[in-house]
Every structure is written in C-alpha cells, then in structure tokens.
Amino acid sequence: MGIINATPDSFYEQGRTNRSVEKAVEMASRMLDEGASILDVGGMSTRPGAIEIPVGEELERVIPVIEAIHADFPGVVISVDTYRAKVAEEAIRSGATMVNDISGGQWDPDLLGVVADHQAAYVAMHIKGNPENMQHHTDYQDVVSDILKYFVSRLQVLEKAGIGEVLLDPGFGFAKTMEQNYQLIDRLEIFRLLGKPLLIGLSRKSTLSKTIGRPAEETLEATTALHMIALQNGASVLRVHDVRPAMDAIAVHNRLVAAKVI
C-alpha cells in the first residue's frame, strides 16, 4: 500500500503532495510502476499532536486526487484514509474501494453504514484517544492482549454492520510507546488468530528515528529491516512511503518462505 498524503503537514516531507493533484498522480504512477497494489490517499495528518481539520477541507484535499488517480489508473485499488462518513462516501463515489479508518469505526457513527452500503473493503486500526492526545494514552495491562481484545470486540461490530472484507491494523505509533511498538511487531503473529489480513504502517515513523538517532528522511534502511520482521511475523500488507524497497523485502521474504527457511 503506497501512501499518498494530500496534506501540507505530514510528518515525512518527501511523502507530501503539497495538495498538487498533478504531483499526486505522478507519485501514484511511480508507486504502481514499483509494484504497489493499493494507493492510500489521505487528506488529514494523524501524526501525534495533529489537529482535526474541517470536513470540507478534507474533501477538498482528497476528492480531486482520488478522481484523477481513478481516471488515469481505473483498475487500481484506491483506499481513502479517513474516519469520516461524508469523506468516505464521496471518496467511494470518486473511485475508492477501500476505507482506511484509524478510529476502527468509533468516531463517526455513520461511517460503517457507508462502508457496508458500498461493499467497500475496510481497515480497522487500533487507537486510544485521538491524534492530538493519543500519546497520553499508552497505559495497557499488556499491549498485545489488550489490542487483541479490542479487535475481537470491533469485529463483532463490523460483522453486525454488514462489512465483509476487513483488514486489521494494530496501530504502530498510535497511543503506543517505543517499547510497545516493538512488542507489537515481535508478537504480531498472535493477531493472525483473528483470521483477518494484517496491515502494518510503520514506514519512517518516529520510533525508528528515535531508535537510530536520525530524522525520518534517513530511516529507510531501518524501515526496511522492520518490514522484514513484520512479514516474518504475519503481516499481509505493508503501508509504505517507499514502494520499491518494500517490494524488495517482500520478494526476499517470499523466497525464504518458498525455501522453507522460515
């Protein structure tokens, strides 16, 4: 899953389109050439401390990008990164077929109905609090078992809502400490008990910057290293800024699996 940020304030500057539709389409073309299967378009930053923007502004950012990508690449799977029903509705009408929701359906009571009505795929992520205050909500009895219980509960809600295709994202970096983020990846295989594909979004995040002591722009190698561990432990989809290195990691992992080394 290639990340296309239609925002001016994403934490990774080189991943921003700076609200240019033309730049977004160029980025989409490059990501598809490099092997991306899904393009995830987001119009509101959800980095730690991010402030919510009006619905209208989010729509103005994402809908032209989705329309343009869908027009140029009509067969590609487009995901909209939003927790708002209005944005999801308009995005699906514009060509999106997946909703990537950091709230797991908790923040907008109408969102799940939109997803179900359009039979869209749905990514349910784990978070506590919201982007503005989530790093004050990192208390868990056990981060992995607590998130597992959260997903069991959310899957019941999603099934009742009529949503069929569900992916689970444990929310690396969302209401987690550095240690908890690494625990999630180390014990990721536990979530496979739920029978759903696991989506992992760890690309260039601050946990990696803090680990190696360098900024997000210099975390590609660290990202790729952790991607390999995530794949070994059960990740099905990698949400990334850098598609080619992620595809290389996937190719090496698949060869190891074929050789029955892991």
Image (cartoon, helix red, strand yellow):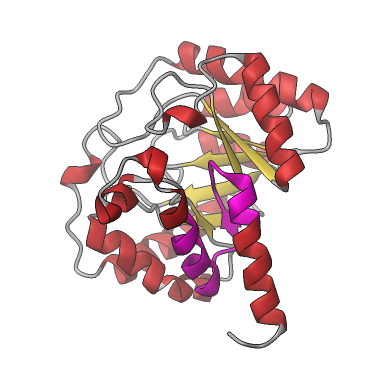
Instruction: State whether residue 169 is above or below residue 187.
Output: above
Residue 242 sits inside the magenta stretch: yes
Which one is in front, 229 or 193?
229
227 shown above or below 2 = below
Q: For the point 44% across and 76% down, which residue is it?
A: 190
Residue 107 at x, y = what percent?
Answer: 39, 36
The quarter of the picture where residue 146 lies is bottom left
Residue 168 position, x and y percent, is 51, 57
| In this rendering, position of residue 237 left or right of residue 30 | left
Q: Quadrant of residue 130?
A: top left
Q: Is residue 26 above or below residue 134?
A: above
Tell me what residue is drawn at x 72 percent, y 81 percent.
258
Tell me where residue 49 appears, x and y as whole percent. Answer: 25, 31
Residue bounds of the magenta highlight: 224-247
Question: Residue extending furthest bottom?
Answer: 260
Q: Is residue 175 visible?
A: yes
In this orientation, does residue 97 appear? no
141 to the left or right of 3: left
Which residue is at 37% across, 32% downward?
A: 11
Residue 183, horizontal then vertical, whole percent: 31, 68
| Residue 58 on the magenta segment | no
Tell me the quarter of the image containing the C terminus. bottom right
Instruction: Give the number of marks.
Output: 0
Q: Is residue 147 left or right of residue 203?
A: left
